Amino acid sequence: MRISARVALVLAVAVAALSTGPALADAPAEPGRDFGIGHRPVCPPAPTGAARCHSDVVTDSGGGPRATTSFMSGYTPAELVDAYNLTSGAVGQTVAIVDAYDNPSAESDLAVYRSQFGLPACTTANLCFRKVNQGGGGTVPKSDVGWGQEIALDLDMVSAVCPDCKVLLVEANSNSFADLAAAVDRSVTMGATAISNSYGGKEFSTEATWESHYHHDGIAITVSSGDNGYGVEFPAALPYVTAVGGTRLSRSTTGGRGWSETVWDGAGSGCSAYIAKPAWQHDLGCSRRTVADVAAVADPATGVAVYDSFGSTGGANWLVFGGTSVAAPVIAAVYAVAGTTLPAARASSSYITPTPTSLFDVTSGSNGRCSTRRTANLAYLCTGESAYDGPTGNGTPNGTGAF
C-alpha cells in the first residue's frame, strides 16, 4: 500500500514522539506541525442551567496532559502578537476574566508565565492583578482543577496580547449560569473595559431574558463559541456579546503574512434557535442571530503555551492548550489594546470596519455539516468562505482596526 509523503511524515513524527518523550513535540512550531498527539476537554459536561469551560489540553499517547518542567512548546506571546499584527499599549485598560470556582495558584502561576516571556509583573502588590468572588469580596469559592486550568489559560492569554492591561479575575461560586452572569455584572461594577467569558452550554427557550447581564454599553464582552463543532451555544448566542470562533493557526511561507489560518473543526457556529438577529448582521441564510462574529487561534494542535501548577503534578507545569477558550480572552485583550471609543454595542464593531484591511479573512476548513441539496445556501454557517462565515465570523485580527 502506498502512502503520501505527508502521511509518512506524520507517522514518523508520531513514532519519534512516542520513543523520545515530550522534547520532540516541544520543539518550536513549524508549518503544519502539531504540538501534541491528542487533546481532551478539562471540564466535564454540564447539567441544564450550567456551563462547561471551553478549554482543551494537549495530551500524550496515554491520554494524560503533555506536560513539561520548562517551557518547550505552544505559541508564545511574541508569536500571537506577530500572527495578529498587534502592538502593545492599553495603559489604563482592565480586562476581566469570568470563570467558575477558584484557582489558588492563579497569581503565582501568572507571575511565572509573564517572567518566562519577559512581560512586566502583574501582581496584587503593584495593583495590576486582582482576584475577587462574584460578590466582589476576597473569600474565594471552592477550587476546581478543570476550571482552574481554564483560569490559568485565560490569564496567560490576556497577558500575552495586552501585557500593559490590568487583570481582574472574578470567580463565580459555581458554573451555574446564574453565578456566572452575576460575575459578569460584578466585573462591570469594578471597572472592566473588556470581559472575557470562556464557557457555554446548550441554548434554551428563555435565554433572551439573560441579555441584560451581557449587555453593558461601551464594554466589550467576548464569549467563546464552543468546542463541539457546528452548533450554537449560550451565552455566545446573545446579541450584544462578541461571539468568538476558532481557527487552526500555522506558520506559512506564502502570502506575505507569515501565518495562515483555516477553520478549526471544533469551533461552534450556526444559527441561534431563539435570539433575534442584531441589526448589524446581514447574512441571508439565518433569520436569527448568527454565530460567530470574529475568531482567533483555537485548535489544540496549534495551541498556546500555558503555565499551571494547580492542575499539574511533579513540577511539570508547562502545558499546551486549545479550544475557543483561547480565542475569547485573546479577542477581549485585542479590544483593550484598541482602547478606542466604539459604538455602544461593541459586538457590532467588526461589521462596521472593512474586512480586507482590518481582519484576516479565513476562507477554508469546516466544523461540520450544515447544508443539504435543499439548503445549500447555508453552507457558510459551517464552512470558511470569503467575507462572513459562521465558524470565523468576519475574520481574525489584523491589528486593532476592527475592535
Image: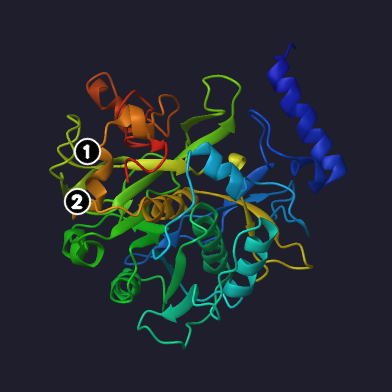
Q: Position of residue 35 (x, y in %)?
A: 68, 41
Q: Which residue lies under the disc numbered 1?
A: 352
User: Which residue is nearer to you in this view: 219 or 58?
Assistant: 219
Q: Position of residue 50 (x, y in %)?
A: 36, 66
Q: Position of residue 23 (x, y in %)?
A: 81, 45
User: Which residue is nearer to you in this view: 115 or 389?
Assistant: 115
User: Which residue is nearer to you in this view: 92 or 326?
Assistant: 92
For badge 1, the amino acid type reads Ile
For badge 2, the amino acid type reads Pro
Q: Is residue 225 above or below residue 153?
A: above
| SS at badge 2 | loop
Q: Can residue 303 be seen at all in this image of the molecule?
A: no
| Image color mode | rainbow
| SS at badge 1 | helix
Q: If the image is split into quadrants, where does the N terminus sit? A: top right
Tally of numbered tags: 2
Q: Earlier in the sequence, mark 1 or mark 2?
A: 2
The local crowd at label 1, few if under 14, some if 14 to 19, many if 20 or more residues have their Cα within 10 Å, is few
Q: Which residue lies under the disc numbered 2?
A: 343
Q: Position of residue 360 (x, y in %)?
A: 41, 31
**In this picture, residue 223 sits left or right of residue 272:** right
Q: Is residue 364 above or below residue 60?
A: above
In space, the residues marked 1 and 2 are separated at their CA atoms by 10 Å
Quadrant in which residue 15 is drawn: top right
**In this picture, residue 216 sits left or right of residue 27:** left
Identify the residue at horizontal 23%, vertical 59% (top origin): 218
Q: Can residue 379 be seen at all in this image of the molecule?
A: yes
Identify the residue at horizontal 30%, vertical 42% (top origin): 293
Residue furthest to the top in view is: 2
The local crowd at label 2, few if under 14, some if 14 to 19, many if 20 or more residues have their Cα within 10 Å, is few
Residues at marks 1 and 2 touching, judged by CB atoms closer than 8 Å: yes
